[in-house]
Amino acid sequence: MSEEPRPKNGDYFTIGELAREFGITTRTIRFYEDQGLLAPLREGRKRLFRRRDRARLKLILRGKRLAFTLDEIKETFDLYDDSTRGEEAQLRYYLGVLAEKRNKLLSQRQDIDETLAELERSERQCLEILEQERRQKRTA
Amino acid sequence: MSEEPRPKNGDYFTIGELAREFGITTRTIRFYEDQGLLAPLREGRKRLFRRRDRARLKLILRGKRLAFTLDEIKETFDLYDDSTRGEEAQLRYYLGVLAEKRNKLLSQRQDIDETLAELERSERQCLEILEQERRQKRTA
DNA sequence: CCGGTAATTGACGTAAGCGTAAACCCGAAT
DNA sequence: ATTCGGGTTTACGCTTACGTCAATTACCGG
């Protein structure tokens, strides 16, 4: 199994530890908290990040890589948060949102595949030209 | 084969046609031109978009869906533009950039797949709860 | 006790990506 | 002749997502 990073200092991560681990600034993490995306514990004024806070941060960053806005990411969190209480209408709405999200992701994956295909074509072209130049050099 | 949209008015698209087709505003298109991403012909002051301009716009929008910045998108255009002239060093550099791009896209696709997997888990959970409620109603 | 390192809040700054008038031109239709 | 639906530039505004001081506070080792 993979080595899950453990909080060095007792049970909690510091803001600096997380910043270093994920290659972001502490400012960024505070900003996310400010926007309601993170809610670490406090010891006086100091933030104490649990493993679940770290997990959330990970999700935030993944969301960003997929071009979700912070607001959208927050919405999915909010959705997950009260998804357990099972009001029928809520659940149906929830299912709809999930379907939308899936569709977006699927078409995004298509975008990626198309781009990858074009990329490989360029690569082949590129290699061909290099190959030609090499042959020219030999005959020269 | 697919019906490639043809310019209605002779050989060129107007800015409005493209805006409608892609669901963006004319402002956006002008902005892209301002940033050097598009370079339509002119008839006096009026912009005339060729099919290749339209193709570029398509690429821009796809890039945006994949969380590329306009600058990054522009770079790839610039790259493609002088990729045909085959200076060896240029080509090697070019290949490197392509490799980077591919890696980014691949890891992005992984992000997508992970997210899709989680999404399906939530969906199953959701359906389970609904199923339970339905059974409760019957016994009631 | 002192200096260094890491944390805090608060505030202003900034780059990207457009939105939104304002003020104009121009050709076709009423 | 005017109105209407496009097109144009210029320019200021706004939101998102942080960067960047500044001015503290707190612990830690020497």
Image: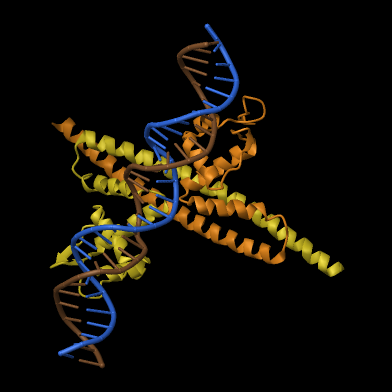
Chain colours: A orange, B yellow, C brown, D blue
Q: Name the residue: 48% across, 46% down.
A: A64
Q: How many marks?
A: 0
* Quadrant in which the N terminus of chain B appears: bottom left
A108 or D23, which is in the foreground?
Answer: D23
A91 or A111, which is in the foreground?
Answer: A91
A106 or A75, which is in the foreground?
Answer: A75
Instruction: Let me know if residue A138 appears in the view.
Output: yes
* Quadrant in which the C terminus of chain B appears: bottom right
Q: Name the residue: 31% across, 38% down.
A: B95
Q: Name the residue: 51% across, 53% down.
A: A71
Looking at the image, residue B26 sits to the left or right of residue C8; the answer is left
Looking at the image, residue B40 sits to the left or right of residue A59; the answer is left
Instruction: Let me know if residue B12 appears in the view.
Output: no
In the rendered image, residue B126, in percent from the top left (x then y), is placed at 69, 58
The image quadrant of residue D14 is bottom left
Q: Relative to A70, is A96 above or below?
A: below
In the rendered image, residue A93, in percent from the top left (x then y), is placed at 63, 64
The image quadrant of residue D9 is bottom left
In the rendered image, residue B118, in percent from the top left (x then y), is placed at 61, 49
Looking at the image, residue A126 sits to the left or right of residue A95; the answer is left
Q: Name the residue: 46% across, 55% down.
A: A108
In the rendered image, residue A127, in percent from the top left (x then y), is placed at 28, 40
Return the residue found at the far right: B139
